Amino acid sequence: MDSSFDIISTEEVKDIRAALEEGDLCTATERASKYLKDIENAPLNIAITGESGTGKSTFVNAIRGMNDEEEGSAKTGVVEMTEKPTPYVHLQYPNVTVWDLPGIGTPSFAADSYLQSVDFSRYDFFIIISSERFKKNDIDLAKAIQAMNKKFYFVRSKVDSDLHACKVRRTKTFNEGNILNEMRNNCIQSLRDGGITEPHVFLLSFLELDKFDFHIMQDTLEKELPEQKRHIFLISLPNISLPVLEKKRQAFKKDIWLWALLSGGVAAVPIPGLSVALDIGILVKAMKTYMNAFGLDEKSLKKLADTFGKDVNELKSVIKSPIVTKEINKELIITILKSAVIGGLMLVEYVVSTIPVIGSLAAGNISFRSTHWMLSGFLEEIAEDAVRVLTKALESPV
Ligand SMILES: Nc1nc2c(ncn2[C@@H]2O[C@H](COP(=O)(O)OP(=O)(O)OP(=O)(O)O)[C@@H](O)[C@H]2O)c(=O)[nH]1
Ligand SMILES: [Mg+2]
């Protein structure tokens, strides 16, 4: 099924469509505005737990796109047992919090009282990390989480070290795929033996988060999260791999028509010199949202360059969109719209064929189409730039 169908089928979006079909643009706009706010501000609380030294704090940093030395990062590599869950707020998306929970390694560990003490109800899901076999405490905890009707996933960390050790020890027969399968099967078996019937186990290295089972984990979490939390989960992911960039592009593409509806809706004002009426502030907001999510701002580019040991100017050199390097403001948007008209890109002819849900009211509206055209073009431009930048960052040094 086309992925754009998923979101279109949500109740909220059905309501927006219904209002449009009744010709009630005001209600449709109000609902679209609420929907866009809701999906961007949906709270997401992720609990990270496991025994001491398994890499919990390293994961907390990596999943927020941070290294271990940055201000605001979780302390790693030191034995520092915290008694309380420590919240780490996502730097760009403050409604996303990753919680570093106290270790579960003590012999007197009791899963129920642990869950009470960490206030289990606040988390959307738990990630239980182990850097070796999953043990009794991990299993007891998973069962207690299940009893509370919450979700949990197992992550086997430090896969890079294991592979390295195998490579050193088995020079002739080394086969990465086989070793990973063996590790995965062992983990699953030990969890099944412990009474967890269908465990989700992901093999990861927190030092190279984009490798191994990262994409399977990301797909699984995305599918299992409630619909209203999926968007924020996806866009808050670090831009570390091409599939992540593609997911973000798709997530935004699905919602362009809503932004277009808002911009061409009740708050639209005529733009001098153009035959359209738009709320340009909405366009500025949408475009800034995309820029942030794809990490093409100066700060994010610098961080990416540092992570991959590249020069930031080398990464910038592959950026093609002239808009990326400019400040996104109302003047810029008017310039783009005007140049499109002058340049012969006839907005009138732009057919919004990607949005079958929209009634003729909006699809036939020139302002709606201009906005849709502009946002689609901008999204494609910056998504492609993000791909070029990351590809450059991933290039091995010559
Ligand atoms: N090779 C490798 N080392 C890792 C990985 N994850 C974490 N480490 C290292 O393991 C050590 C412990 O990591 P932490 O993130 O501090 O572990 P923790 O679970 O938070 O430890 P406590 O807070 O003491 O319970 C650090 O030296 C990390 O750099 C990994 O995936 N691969
Ligand atoms: Mg820690």
Image (cartoon, grey):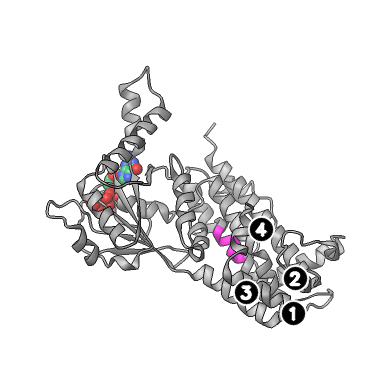
Q: Which residues are magenta?
A: 288-293
Q: Are marks 2 and 1 in contact (CB under 8 Å)?
A: yes
Q: Residue at x 32, y 46 (%)?
A: 197
Q: Of label 1 and label 3, which has the lower sequence position?
A: 3
Q: Amino acid at mark 4?
A: Leu
Instruction: From the image, tell me which residue sits under label 4.
Output: 379
Sooner in the amino-acid sequence: mark 3 or mark 4: 3
Tell me if the residue at label 3 has its CB under 8 Å from ligand 1. Answer: no
Residue beneath disc 3:
15
- Give the residue number, with chain letter if any, for mark 1: 23
Q: Name the spot of residue 367 as percent of width and height, x first.
A: 78, 72
Q: Find out whether the residues at labels 2 and 4 contact each other: C-beta distance under 8 Å.
A: no
In the picture, measured across the screen, residue 237 lies left or right of residue 349, that is: left
Residue drawn at x 25%, y 65% as measured from the top left: 118
Gap in angstroms between the C-alphas marked 2 and 4? 23 Å
State the residue in front, 1 or 265.
1
> Rounded to the nearest whole Å, what is the CA distance between mark 3 and mark 4?
26 Å
